[in-house]
Image (cartoon, rainbow, N blue to C red):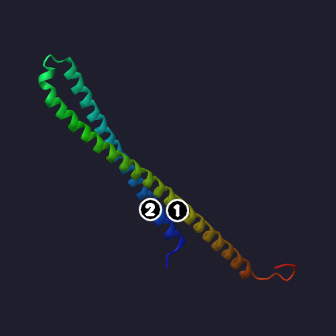
Amino acid sequence: MRTTGDRLKRAQRLVTVQEQMRRAAEIELAATRERAAGIEADRVRLLAALASSDHGPMLLEATARRLRGLAAQATAVEAQAAAQADAVRERGLAQKRAEALAERRADDHRREADKRDDLERLDGLAARPARPDASLP
């Protein structure tokens, strides 16, 4: 049989795991956003080089291919970032649910401890020898 203390410890471990999973998802999202920024920077550099080059018309076909490739990469990375943002949001909600569960377990544990203390006090009162001159026990 699990005690309230065991359930509380388990709930606290769950909160810790959920927090670690949320942090990992946030790190992954930040890395994806950095990749998206890098792709955009490549696109800007490529367009700037094309605009400033005297050989622009000769490089046009290669530049167009590269820009299409960058656009495809950007689209894929944006979709990945959106999915990761959803995952971060879900991890945050899971962490909140775990925290709420841990709080309920802590309340249960406190109530159980209070109940035990009350019973011990009652047992202590019941175990006292009765004084003959007292009007109440």
Q: How far from the left and from the top, in percent, is residue 2?
A: 49, 76
Q: How far from the left and from the top, in percent, is residue 44?
A: 26, 27
Q: Relative to the observer, which residue lies in front, 111 or 19?
A: 19
Q: Is residue 99 above or below residue 113?
A: above
Left or right of 66: which side holds 1? right
Q: Quadrant of the C terminus?
A: bottom right
Mark 2 = which residue? 14
| Mark 2: few/some/many CA within 10 Å (<14, 14-19, 20+) | some
Amino acid carrying label 1: it is: Ala
Q: Is residue 24 above or below residue 110?
A: above
Question: Please, what secondary structure does the residue beneath circle 2 have?
Answer: helix
Mark 1 = which residue? 102
Question: Which residue is at a point 17% across and 18% down the rendered structure image?
Answer: 53
Q: How far from the left and from the top, in percent, is residue 7?
A: 50, 69
| Mark 1: few/some/many CA within 10 Å (<14, 14-19, 20+) | many
Amino acid carrying label 2: it is: Leu
Q: Are marks 1 and 2 in contact (CB under 8 Å)?
A: yes
Q: CA distance from mark 1 to mark 2?
A: 8 Å
Q: How far from the left and from the top, in percent, is residue 24?
A: 36, 50
